[in-house]
């Protein structure tokens, strides 16, 4: 019976290690949830700014994007962008619809505002399990992921969402039919356009980690560039309505991100090759 004690102790240590791991995860989740609740509470009480200025901004003609398109059209000698005014009514059809939308939208805003901190908590949980060289290779991950997320969010809010809303709100099959858009449908369209662009803009970081793991190479991305262009066009068509102008505007930055990702994968391989050569040189020198 005595020889079984070491195995038993090892089992207890392994079990305690697993419990400690779950305990650490629990506190990461709790801190992340608290951050979302704090930002969501602030958004709930900032109702006028969140809804009137932010959420309902693309539904009015004085929105920045529409005014910029109008000025651009005037500079090019065309007044057509100024004539495409947003003309629809947003309405609520349920008794508790506005309250429910107020709460759910506040939590959505809380998640968006807390995203950098959420990813930081996720990174703090994952980082201890990485090897030293993996930690070194992924320095600045939280910063770059947050920056790309914010850039995608701004692009979706100021470019993709207004173009989609303007096209869908002005599209009619008959002039006698008035567009009265349900509030939930409008906010769903706005959040879908915005969040889709925010996550699509993470493509360079995704390629970076895949290249570090050896799962993708710049040659593969170059060989399948034509296929990627087709996928990007389909993705742009899904994100935006069937408006060729909006699709082109959304497609261009995604193509730029894809080409940037190829260069990132190439830089990752050069760095890995340089480190491997340096390691081999040190081993040869030590052997001599």
Image: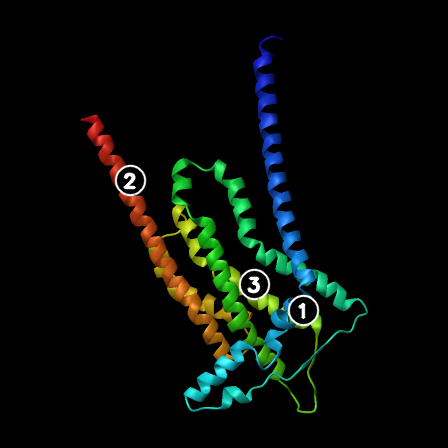
Determine which residue is flagged by label 3.
Answer: 195
Camera sees residue 268: yes
The quadrant of the image that shows the C terminus is top left
**Rendered view: 23 above or below 167:** above
Determine which residue is flagged by label 2.
Answer: 276
What residue sits 68% from the left and 56% below the top?
A: 41
Residue 287 image point, x, y percent: 21, 26
Camera sees residue 202: no
Do the residues under discs 2 and 3 have CB atoms within 8 angstroms? no
Ranked by sequence position, the earlier of labels 2 and 3 is 3
- Quadrant of the rendered image containing residue 144: bottom left
- Quadrant of the rendered image containing residue 262: bottom left
Say few, some or many: other residues with alpha carbon within 10 Å of mark 2 (under 14 / 14 to 19 / 20 or more).
few
* Secondary structure at numbered mark 2: helix
**Rendered view: 185 above or below 147:** below
Give how far apart the Cα atoms at labels 1 and 3 are: 22 Å
Q: Which of 173 and 161 lies nearest the eye of the viewer? A: 161
Residue 248 image point, x, y percent: 45, 75
Give how far apart the Cα atoms at labels 2 and 1 are: 57 Å
Give how far apart the Cα atoms at labels 2 and 3 are: 39 Å
What residue sits 59% from the left and 66% below the top?
A: 192
Closer to the observer: label 1 or label 3?
Answer: 1
Give the left or right position of residue 223, taking residue 192 as reference. Answer: left
Do the residues under discs 1 and 3 have CB atoms within 8 angstroms? no
Q: Which of 183 and 177 lies nearest the eye of the viewer? A: 183
Determine which residue is flagged by label 1.
Answer: 48
Q: How is the image coloured?
A: rainbow
What residue sits 62% from the left and 81% below the top?
A: 169
Say few, some or many: other residues with alpha carbon within 10 Å of mark 1 (under 14 / 14 to 19 / 20 or more).
few
Residue 213 image point, x, y percent: 41, 45
């Amino acid at each position: 019976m005595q020889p079984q004690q070491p195995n038993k102790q090892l089992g207890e240590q392994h079990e305690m290690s697993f419990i400690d791991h779950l305990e650490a995860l629990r506190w990461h989740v709790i801190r992340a949830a608290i951050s979302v609740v704090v930002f969501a509470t602030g958004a709930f009480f900032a109702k006028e700014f969140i809804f009137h200025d932010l959420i309902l901004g693309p539904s009015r003609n004085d929105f920045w994007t529409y005014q910029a398109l109008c000025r651009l059209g005037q500079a090019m000698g065309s007044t057509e962008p100024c004539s495409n005014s947003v003309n629809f009514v947003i309405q609520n059809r349920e008794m508790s619809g506005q309250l429910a939308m107020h709460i759910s939208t506040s939590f959505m805003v809380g998640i968006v505002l807390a995203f950098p901190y959420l990813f930081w908590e996720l990174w703090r949980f994952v980082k201890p399990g990485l090897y030293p060289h993996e930690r070194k290779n992924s320095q600045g991950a939280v910063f770059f992921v947050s920056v790309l997320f914010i850039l995608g969010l701004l692009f979706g809010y100021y470019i993709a969402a207004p173009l989609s809303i303007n096209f869908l709100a002005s599209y009619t099959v008959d002039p006698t039919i008035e567009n009265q858009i349900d509030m939930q449908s409008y906010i769903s369209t706005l959040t879908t356009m915005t969040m889709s662009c925010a996550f699509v803009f993470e493509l360079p970081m995704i390629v970076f980690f895949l290249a570090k793991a050896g799962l993708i190479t710049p040659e593969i991305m170059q060989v399948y560039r034509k296929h990627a262009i087709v996928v990007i066009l389909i993705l742009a068509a899904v994100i935006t309505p069937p408006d060729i102008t909006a699709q082109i505007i959304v497609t261009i930055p995604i193509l730029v991100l894809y080409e940037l990702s190829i260069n990132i994968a190439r830089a990752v391989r050069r760095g890995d090759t340089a480190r491997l050569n340096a390691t081999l040189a040190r081993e040869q020198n030590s052997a001599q």
